Amino acid sequence: MSACPEDENLGIAANLLYGLQHVLTMYGGIVAVPLIIGQGAGLSADEIGILITASLFAGGLATILQTMGVPFFGCRLPLVQGVSFAGVATMLAIIGSNGRAGLPAVMGGVMGASLLGLLITPVFSRVIRFFPPLVTGIVITTIGFSLIPVAARWAMGGNPAAPDFGSLSNIGLAALTLAIVLLLSKLGSAAVSRLSILLAMVIGTAVAFALGMADFSKATAAPAFALPSLFHFGWPVFDIAAVLSMFIVILVTLVETSADILAVGEIIGTRIDERRLGNGLRADMLSSIVAPVFGSFTQSAFAQNVGLIAVTGIKSRYVVAMAGVILVALGLLPVIGRVVAAVPPPVLGGAGLVLFGTVAASGIRSLAKVDYVNNMNLVIMATSLSVGMIPIVAPHFYEHFPSWFVTIFHSGISSAALTAVSLNLLFNHFTAGNSDQQSVFVAGTERILRYQDVSMLHDGDYFLGGRLYDAAGNEVKIAADHH
């Protein structure tokens, strides 16, 4: 085994199985953005399919670059890359009423903003010292909580407009998949336990097919092989307003990717330094520059796969690199992509409840290591988690705010990250003006004993059950405190 857990190579067969598990976990997320953008642009089903295969292909290339790395690009950690959700609203705004004709401006905005993001990555890579366990724990916890609604929607059927959305059959299938995950984790061997997510998805899909809840008929309608089309929607148009609006999205993406890189490092037990963080951010930006060439959008790390690493304990970057190879293959083989797309959303939802909950649990475990005695860390944690939860529990909270503000704070992850970093700077770095007892929440948390009381203790004295005993076990009388 390698000294670094992420450098362990499990062999082709294991890499393929565990890599497929990663692909199944994030497949629904990676196709969601091109579906939304394609529908918003009024594209035909065939052209939406081109957007989807382009996103799979670009995500695979980005994943291989991030995991395997080349000089100055790639953090060489088990991070799956895919289309970022952060830019959906902004890209739809750029398209506006132009329909398909607005896509070149979207592609140009993504490329221009990503180039600017690439130029400023040295600044972001230096912020690692502002991400102590307090901040990373808050961000990891928020990542987990922000993904729970995704799992819930999957469990209900995935499509809110469908007549069976939220039906007992959908939720029952999700519950069955969840039960299979737990059962295999408890009763299976180590190998079975690590594959519990993948096996549960296969079994859940088989049950769904037997019950008529899975449809594979459309899989054979797609061509077996197709190369990605370069600039299929036209040459990019570099509109200044589009580039600037997408640059705000890129800033959010950089914050989220920084958090994901640090989260993975925390989970697998690898120290992330400034150089490694910078390499990861540069890979993100380079992938986002190249993705529009194939017809895709901004690329970033997928948070749901962080949960899969935490659940399975498989920390190898070669596993995730294999997931990248599978994604590239799916981008070249539309028929395989349609088969994977036929996995029912409730099956994904049942597995997602375990995966995403594990991310939150990992963050809570990090927060347990933080010192809360006579400082503002408890308040920082409480405030940051609350701000991060606002977009999750009240999605329309910021709808009357300026669009640039909404772009930044509509994501619970970026909201929590920015709040945690800012408050950590305010109270733990810029300490001028801090009082000894900074708020009612920390007052009295410091233990203070009078010297005259301590001076009366002897070696070997101990306190048990509200009584004081000496070294020989004899009780020492404690006088009542009279005022």
Image (cartoon, helix red, strand yellow):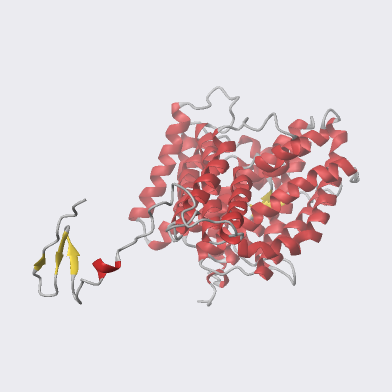
Image vertical order of residue 468 relative to residue 172, above or below: below
Q: How many marks?
A: 0
Residue 381 screen position, x and y as percent:
50, 50
- Viewer-proximal residue, 407 or 159? 407
Determine which quarter of the picture holds residue 321. bottom right
- Residue 319 visible at all: yes
Q: Which residue is situated farthest in the top direction here?
A: 163
Residue 320 screen position, x and y as percent:
60, 61
What's the residue at 56%, 71% (across, down)? 9
Residue 5 screen position, x and y as percent:
52, 71
What's the residue at 24%, 66% (across, down)? 453
What's the residue at 75%, 35% (across, down)? 403
Determine which quarter of the picture holds residue 216. top right
- Residue 79 visible at all: no
Determine which quarter of the picture holds residue 86. top right
Residue 285 screen position, x and y as percent:
76, 57
- Viewer-proximal residue, 140 or 432? 432
Q: Left or right: 242 with respect to 266?
A: right
- Viewer-proximal residue, 433 or 54? 433
Q: Which residue is situated farthest in the front direction here?
A: 483
Q: Which residue is situated farthest in the left direction here?
A: 474
Q: Left or right: 272 with respect to 206?
A: right
